[in-house]
Amino acid sequence: MASWALGANHPLGLIFDQQTSMAMQHMSIHDTNITMNGRQIWLPLELILEAFLDMIDQGKALAVDSSYDGEQEKIGPWTMPAYTVCDLDQTLEAFSRLTHAVESRIPATRSNETHRLGDAISSSVLSPNSFAGQFLARARETRFSQIAPGLRIARQQPFSSINVEEGKIRPILLFESSQEAHQDTEQTPWGEEVPILQFPQRFGDITSYPAGIYLTETDPHGAHPFEDGCKLILPYAIGENGWARTSDGALFGEKTHAKGPTASPVPRSTQLYQQGLNHFIQTHDVQLKHVLWHWADMVEKGKWAVDVDGVAGGIEKWREADTKDHWQDYQLPMSW
């Protein structure tokens, strides 16, 4: 199943292993260096085909005919909306579930003060029809501020001063830490430590910003847009213990192109909850709904405590993701 129409350089496609009856999407021939590194888990073909059907059912993959003249980039007979009604409804449902779970566990002495997600961002910054505009406008008020360990509802937007091209969307801070985001680095072949960009270069003038959950930048009319994609940036790097993993099972910071049954981790501050290699379509930042559903589950199962301010534990709680006893509590299942 060729992916010549997917916009990749040296495209390949969906590869089926006839010996094992397993399959995996390859956006590029270069992906084989990762998928055949001896550690990646391939999936039954039917699971991948079911994911494709799910994308169609949810409106994430739309078939159009030759008369289509909309703004969304068309690849073959397909377009991919930046977000769907289903995405928005499920994200609102996940946020509602999380906030109700927290509020039902807050001690009776709680404050009557309410908090709104949209209070820290001007409506003029967002298109009312964007995912962020719709989500922030419709998300329910909460009677607590701490939405996750060490993360409160955002009170600032560090990238609001950066101009972006018309139609494109800048990063939006949803839940912030009181601490600054950690800056990951990597070593060049000549031994120099250079910063790893957490956002595109055009946002590079902002060198200090809070740790927290960001809706990441996107081109809503591009080939593979996910307006609801998000990134958790911690104020420190984790992974050195070799337990923290992305959804595909890879260790944080591992050299995915290196072959062999084992790999060495490199601490990272941005890989928690991320997909790693997407087995279905082009890799993108994890959808916000998956993170919020997971947080609700952590509260409901008692893995996160609640106090008068909301979710307790402090920012150090996230270090559990790199421990033998708790790493599985911080790894999201694979998703398209």
Image (cartoon, rainbow, N blue to C red):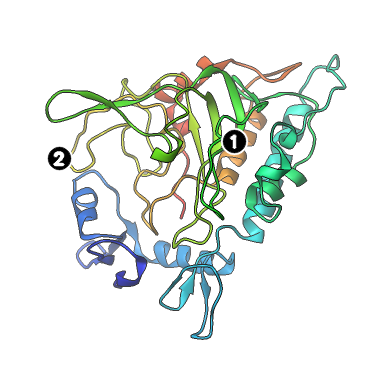
Visible in this render: residue 303?
Answer: no
* Picture residue at 55% right of the left edge, 51% below the top: 227
Secondary-structure class at tag 2: loop
**Separation of residues labelled 2 and 1 (CA atoms):** 44 Å
Q: Position of residue 67 (x, y in %)?
A: 53, 85
Please identify the residue farthest to the left as the structure is shown.
190
Q: Which residue is mark 1?
A: 160
Q: Nearer the viewer, residue 164 or 266?
A: 164
Q: In this view of the protein, which residue sits in the foreground, 119 or 22?
A: 119
Viewer-nearest residue: 7 or 98:
7
- Residue name at image x 50 percent, y 69 percent: 53
Residue 108 image-quadrant placement: top right
In percent of width and height, residue 243 lies at 35, 27
Q: Position of residue 113 (x, y in %)?
A: 84, 22
Report which quarter residue 272 is drawn in. top left
Q: Is the residue 59 above or below the residue 277 in the image?
A: below
Q: Which residue is mark 2?
A: 260
Residue 48 in view here: yes
Q: Image check: 79 left or right of 101?
A: left
